[in-house]
Amino acid sequence: MKFLLNCLLLLPYLILCSLESLVKLFIPKKRKSVSGEIVLITGAGHGIGRLTAYEFAKLKSKLVLWDINKHGIEETAAECRKLGAKAHAFVVDCSNREDIYSSAKKVKTEIGDVSILINNAGVVYTSDLFATQDPQIEKTFEVNILAHFWTTKAFLPAMMKNNHGHIVTVASAAGHTVVPFLMAYCSSKFAAVGFHRALTDELAALERTGIKTTCLCPNFINTGFIKNPRTSLGPTLEPEQVVDKLMNGILTEQKMIFVPSSIKLLTLLERILPERFLVILKRKINIRFDAVVGYKVKGH
């Protein structure tokens, strides 16, 4: 009863916060400067990571680029240099904790303290549980979530000391709602969203308000990782439009970025609508892509 009464007392504050949020929708938020910031991007050898590096290069940030693909990461670094930025390329296996820690030590010694960390590296296997091999499940979690812990542990202390920094988690819409034949991927992205939210609250509890956090949750992106994705939610997203939303979110210090924004509504509906209705709704959304299915239904 006392808890209910306390909640009712918060009602005026809820109304005030709601009105404030409504007003902010019509007032463009000022973008922060990232000139001179040391920005580390994992998975920067291709796709979202590469395009994000280009955008930071245009803003005169100093770039530290990690990827397991030597050719890809060197190409990204070369293009960043053409855009006028200092860029340092490192071949790093983000599924290997010791490789992350040793590379992080090298970065701190040779370049300096990272102030913007973008955990972008990711892997995906499109198959059902039975067709997904054990090493594939392990690698999905090592890259998609455990690497976030190791990079953050490596670079957060300097941010804490200066009470200045930004940690970006590239997750997915699959971190809020599940899709068949992406079990390992969805599970790892749910963990990534949880990592972002827990880190955000932990920084607030430690009164490190100068360290910002952002989480990106896009729908299917046309990067070639998932073959032939289709959904009634709209066309597959182009990497450029996702990076545009990501950069705006980082520079305006948004906590959570959904691309498209309708994903936010769907995640809310999934929490409040009856289960039977959700089954019908998911059929209407009709998410499809090429997948390996190991379990065979009788008669098929």
Image (tube, rainbow, N blue to C red):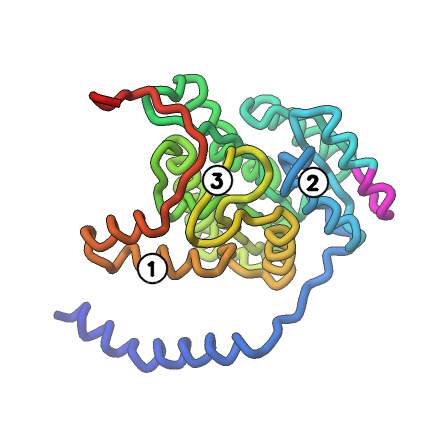
Query: Which residue in the structure is indicated by mark 1?
Result: 268
Which kind of residue does numbered mark 3 sit on? Pro
Question: Spatial distance from mark 1 to mark 3, Cα to Cα?
Answer: 23 Å
User: Which mark lies nearer to you, 1 or 3?
Assistant: 3
Of callouts 3 and 2, the N-terminal one: 2
> In x, y percent, where is residue 66?
68, 32
Residue at (47%, 53%) from the top-left corner?
200
Residue situated in front as seen by the camera: 16 or 127:
127
> In x, y percent, where is residue 204?
47, 57
Residue 251 sits above or below residue 283 on the image: below
Query: Which residue in the structure is indicated by mark 3?
Result: 229
Residue 160 visible at all: no
Residue at (79%, 53%) from the top-left corner?
58
Q: Regarding mark 1 in the picture, which secondary structure is present there?
A: helix
Residue 208 in the figure: left or right of residue 64: left
Query: Which residue in the structure is indicated by mark 2?
Result: 50
Of callouts 1 and 2, the N-terminal one: 2
Residue 132 sits above or below residue 250 on the image: above
Which kind of residue does numbered mark 1 sit on? Leu
> In x, y percent, where is residue 181?
37, 32
- Crowd rating for badge 3 (residues with CA inside 10 Å; few <14, some 14–19, many 20+): some
User: Which mark lies nearer to you, 3 or 2?
Assistant: 3
Q: Bounds of the magenta span?
A: 79-87
